[in-house]
Image (cartoon, rainbow, N blue to C red):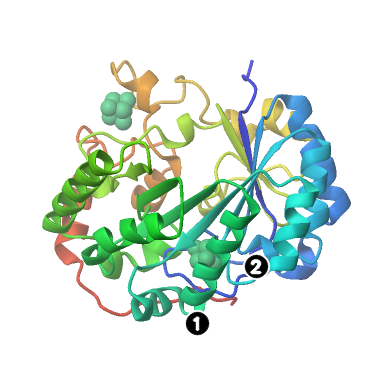
Amino acid sequence: MADAPLALLAELTHRCPLRCPYCSNPMELARASSELTTAEWARVFREAAALGCLQLHLSGGEPTVRRDIVEIVAAARAAGLYSNLITAGVLLDAGLMARLVEAGLDHVQLSVQDADEAGAERIGGMKGAQAKKRAAAALVRQSGLPLTLNAVVHRQNLHNLSELIAIALEWGAQRLEVAHVQYYGWALANRDALLPTRAQLDAATGIVDAARLANRGRLVIDYVVPDYYAARPKACMGGWGRRFLAVSPMGEVLPCHAAKSVTGMVFPNIRDTSLEAAWTGSDAFNAFRGMAWMPAPCQGCAHAERDWGGCRCQAFALTGDAAATDPACALSPHHAMLAAAVAEAGEARFRYREFS
Ligand code: SF4
Ligand code: SF4
């Protein structure tokens, strides 16, 4: 029997004014016409709460491109969910901020692409974005809502990590997520331009350690290290179908936001089924639950209940087999692929995300 999920990621849309080359959206982006309606999202939220979910992450794309974002936040509040708006901030103005607060929004997570203005605008592919983000952070702070800054770090912005931490302090964030890129979808297509060097990684880890000490009680820093330098994989999503579920803009119920990259898997759709049936009874969720599905060397491994064999999307992206041991594990027969990818990295240009 599946435990209750703790959190739901609602990907309200794939539309976004930015074009980040590491975007976690699938390569094939959903059109606005196929997106779930306000009423369909409200139903998803009620069913998530009934299933035991406590937290709701409103994401995208950029969730504020939805004209009904205020109604969606109100529906989350009506369902009793703690709502977190994950936004690039470039569409947030004082009027919208006030309406979101009134509708019951609980938290804002704002992305920042670089500390350097020109670098940020090059990475995000949008002119003028940094000034809008700074203004958005000020609006969130004035509203009284807690603010988290999310900085995805990679080869082309790690030299500015200290400045990114300074921005988090200057903009009044209580928490900063320093997250190395995860390589599937758009990020995998840009891997040669994004993978950091070992020297960059070691410097970043030192900077984060020092900043945590220096800013204790003022700024919490979460740090997600890159799999490509790891000896053990991450417990991706706390294990497939254990704690987390996502719903795509067109209603597919997914065990993680990247699961659509596992081509060939069929995911249940909220338009045809209930969230509970998708969570407890679908083949997609049950495929990699628990440990029975695990191949050698995971089968019987002492770490299996801690890392759950790593990331299924990464296993599929690198080996073509979603049931393989994550190559991030040093015990995987495919582990050498990661060092080979690191050796090949160094491309300067990005392939920006775009609708095909
Ligand atoms: S990663 Fe960039 S492009 Fe993708 S949704 Fe976030 S801000 Fe938009
Ligand atoms: S063999 Fe499997 S379970 Fe063991 S550490 Fe590696 S990924 Fe984790």
Specify whether tag 1 is near ligand 1 (CB below 8 Å): no
Specify whether tag 2 is near ligand 1 (CB below 8 Å): no
Is 303 placed left or right of 71 in the picture?
Answer: left
Residue 188 in which image quadrant:
bottom left
Q: Name the amino acid, label 1.
A: Gly
Which numbered disc covers residue 92? 2
SS at circle 2: loop
Please tell me which residue lies in front, 103 or 326: 103
Q: Residue furthest bottom?
A: 127
Q: Residue furthest front?
A: 142
User: Which residue is painted at 84% across and 57% down in the image?
Assistant: 37
Question: At which x and y percent is residue 221?
Answer: 35, 43
Which numbered disc covers residue 239? none
Is 226 placed left or right of 84 in the picture?
Answer: left
SS at circle 1: loop
For the N terminus, the quadrant is top right
In the rendered image, the vertical position of residue 268 relative to residue 341, given as above or below: above
Mark pair 1, 2: CA separation = 14 Å
Q: Quadrant of ligand 2?
A: top left
Q: Residue furthest right?
A: 39
User: Which residue is painted at 39% across and 80% down in the image?
Assistant: 122
Within-10-Å neighbours for mark 1: few <14, some 14–19, many 20+: few
Q: Write down the residue under mark 1.
A: 128
Is 161 placed left or right of 253 in the picture?
Answer: left
User: Which residue is painted at 69% across and 64% down in the image?
Assistant: 64
